[in-house]
Image (cartoon, rainbow, N blue to C red):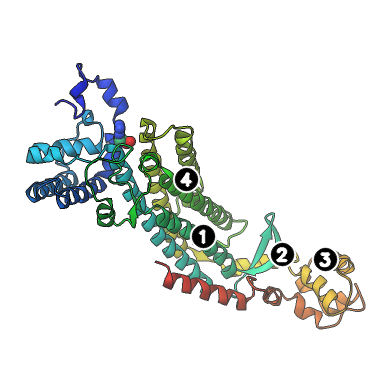
């Protein structure tokens, strides 16, 4: 069958052209959005008197039938149709005849693809928002159980100060809440309708863009059609939001990998989500977090690729922009899978409190507390207190102890101004709870943070 645009052509398109030029093999993923957009367009054309009600009804019926054909696998895909828009339009005309040929009045594939793709991205933005809320809820649940669970807080991957495991989990809740907010603000900013922009400059037909915008769940039509048909910021935004979220996931994944090693043993990944080795029978490998860490790479790649496609494009639509879709589909697919399995891993992992507490006893985590004690209780300048504390650390090392395990008698030998109450300050749990400044790790602060996230989860759409 001749191409829908073949009027001015004498020779048929080559097969190689079809293969190179077609987006159908991947943009068929947008068939639901394409049909949704076409139904809204047909309703608007009829409302404006451009189509009869009868024509509208047969178009809508035909489109619904096509949707079923595609869903059930009965639809015949033909690469020479080029893209999902023409494949559906051609089939519509086969099914309903001349009325099908009127559907493209006051529309171009340029506003059509911009509409379809935006509808798809908006659906995904909402799904990510939902999944991120579920993920945050898991961190909050774990935090509730582990307000007292001591963990060595680290900087430079070296033991630094005692924190609670709850506090550590809520750091991730904070990260993923920012991700949620990014998806949400992208949704809000981009929820405007390209439909009716036609090729680039609008249309002489008396259309109602406000109507189609509302039909499709957009807040309003876009303001400038020349920009609209060449705007892919919404796609770039979801790619960036996914890339950033995956970066966060990769950091957590890295910690899960470390924590499940023999050196840490802070967590045990459930058998359901761990893998074995084909040669070493004893092994249990953290393949899932490793893949989570790795998938960040493709998310970055997809973002860079579309940024590069868009760079330097003159207004308005250029065929370059057909390369916008596959990267987004890829990022969306892998990010969704990642979020789903990450939630399972977190929900089913065993948290070894004892190992964490044991690890907190290594590395003199409460050394800063001795310095603070000397400043606050004894009135020694901080620099001097720092020096005396260094001596205490050296003594502890000599005795094969952690600074939190030194007795008053032992500490007294370092500086006679030290009083018996020092022991209280060096205790790890007390050290953690001493960090009661806003946003700190004390159980009191952590409780406030839990309540903050619970409120967020109750209110966020
Ligand atoms: N398949 C095209 C794409 O994905 C649809 C828009 C084509 N428009 C055009 N004027 N060739 O971008």
Q: Earlier in the sequence, mark 2 or mark 1?
A: 1
Give how far apart the Cα atoms at labels 2 and 1 are.
Answer: 33 Å
Q: Is residue 268 visible?
A: yes
Of residue 170 and residue 190, the one placed in the foreground of this image is: 190
Whole-percent x, y for residue 254 in the image: 56, 52
Give how far apart the Cα atoms at labels 3 and 2 are.
Answer: 12 Å
The residue at the point 25 percent across, 52 percent down is 212
Of residue 318 and residue 309, the one placed in the foreground of this image is: 318
Q: Is residue 146 visible?
A: no
Disc number placed over residue 295 in the picture, else none: 4
Which class describes the residues within 10 Å of circle 1: few (<14), some (14-19), or many (20+)? Answer: some
Give how far apart the Cα atoms at labels 1 and 4 are.
Answer: 20 Å
Give how far apart the Cα atoms at labels 1 and 3 are.
Answer: 39 Å
Helix, strand or loop at label 1? It is helix
The residue at the point 72 percent across, 64 percent down is 362
Question: Is 140 on the left or on the right of 214, as rendered?
Answer: right
Question: Is 363 on the left or on the right of 284, as rendered?
Answer: right
Q: Earlier in the sequence, mark 1 or mark 4?
A: 1
Whole-percent x, y for residue 105 in the image: 19, 40
Q: Earlier in the sequence, mark 1 or mark 3?
A: 1
Whole-percent x, y for residue 257 in the image: 55, 53
Which class describes the residues within 10 Å of circle 4: few (<14), some (14-19), or many (20+)? Answer: many
Q: Earlier in the sequence, mark 3 or mark 4?
A: 4
Whereabouts is ligand 1, in terms of quadrant?
top left
Instruction: Point out the residue furthest to the top here.
Output: 11
Question: Is 61 on the left or on the right of 423, as rendered?
Answer: left
Foreground: disc 2 or disc 1: 1
From the image, tell me which residue sits under label 1: 178
Disc number placed over residue 362 in the picture, else none: 2
Foreground: disc 1 or disc 4: 1
Do the CB atoms of the residues marked 3 and 2 lie less than 8 Å apart? no
Is the N terminus in the top left, top right, bottom left or bottom right quadrant? Answer: top left
């Amino acid at each position: 069958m001749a191409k829908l645009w073949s009027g001015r052509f004498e020779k048929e398109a080559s097969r190689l052209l079809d293969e190179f030029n077609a987006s159908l093999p991947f943009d068929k993923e947008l068939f639901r959005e394409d049909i949704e957009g076409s139904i809204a367009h047909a309703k608007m054309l009829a409302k404006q008197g451009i189509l009869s009600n009868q024509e509208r009804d047969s178009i809508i019926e035909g489109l619904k039938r096509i949707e079923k054909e595609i869903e059930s696998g009965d639809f015949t895909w033909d690469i020479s149709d080029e893209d999902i828009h023409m494949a559906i339009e051609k089939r519509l005309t086969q099914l309903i005849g001349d009325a099908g040929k009127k559907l493209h009045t006051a529309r171009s594939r340029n506003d059509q693809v911009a509409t379809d793709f935006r509808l798809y991205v908006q659906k995904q933005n909402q799904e990510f928002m939902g999944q991120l809320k579920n993920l945050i809820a898991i961190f909050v649940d774990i935090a509730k159980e582990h307000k007292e669970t001591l963990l060595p807080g680290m900087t430079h991957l070296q033991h630094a100060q005692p924190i609670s495991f709850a506090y550590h989990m809520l750091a991730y809740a904070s990260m993923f809440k920012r991700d949620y907010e990014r998806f949400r603000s992208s949704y809000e900013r981009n929820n405007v309708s390209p439909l009716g922009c036609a090729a680039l400059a609008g249309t002489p037909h008396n259309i109602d863009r406000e109507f189609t915008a509302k039909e499709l769940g957009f807040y309003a039509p876009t303001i400038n059609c020349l920009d609209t048909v060449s705007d892919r910021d919404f796609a770039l935004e979801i790619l960036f939001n996914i890339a950033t979220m995956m970066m966060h996931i990769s950091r957590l994944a890295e910690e899960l990998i470390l924590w499940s090693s023999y050196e840490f043993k802070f967590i045990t990944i459930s058998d359901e989500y761990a893998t074995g080795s084909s040669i070493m029978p004893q092994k249990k490998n953290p393949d899932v977090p490793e893949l989570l860490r790795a998938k960040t790479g493709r998310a970055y790649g997809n973002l860079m690729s579309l940024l590069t496609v868009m760079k330097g494009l003159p207004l308005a639509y250029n065929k370059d922009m057909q390369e916008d879709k596959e990267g987004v589909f890829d990022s969306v697919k892998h990010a969704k899978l990642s979020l789903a399995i990450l939630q399972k891993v977190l929900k089913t992992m065993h948290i070894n409190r004892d190992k964490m507490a044991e690890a907190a006893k290594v590395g003199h985590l409460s050394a800063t507390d001795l310095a603070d004690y000397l400043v606050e209780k004894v009135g020694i300048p901080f620099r001097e207190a720092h020096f005396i504390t260094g001596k205490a650390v050296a003594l502890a090392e000599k005795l094969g102890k952690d600074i939190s395990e030194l007795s008053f008698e032992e500490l007294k030998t370092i500086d006679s101004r030290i009083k018996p109450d020092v022991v209280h300050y060096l205790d790890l749990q007390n050290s953690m709870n001493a960090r009661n400044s806003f946003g700190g790790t004390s159980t009191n602060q952590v409780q406030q943070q839990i309540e903050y996230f619970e409120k967020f989860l109750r209110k966020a759409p």
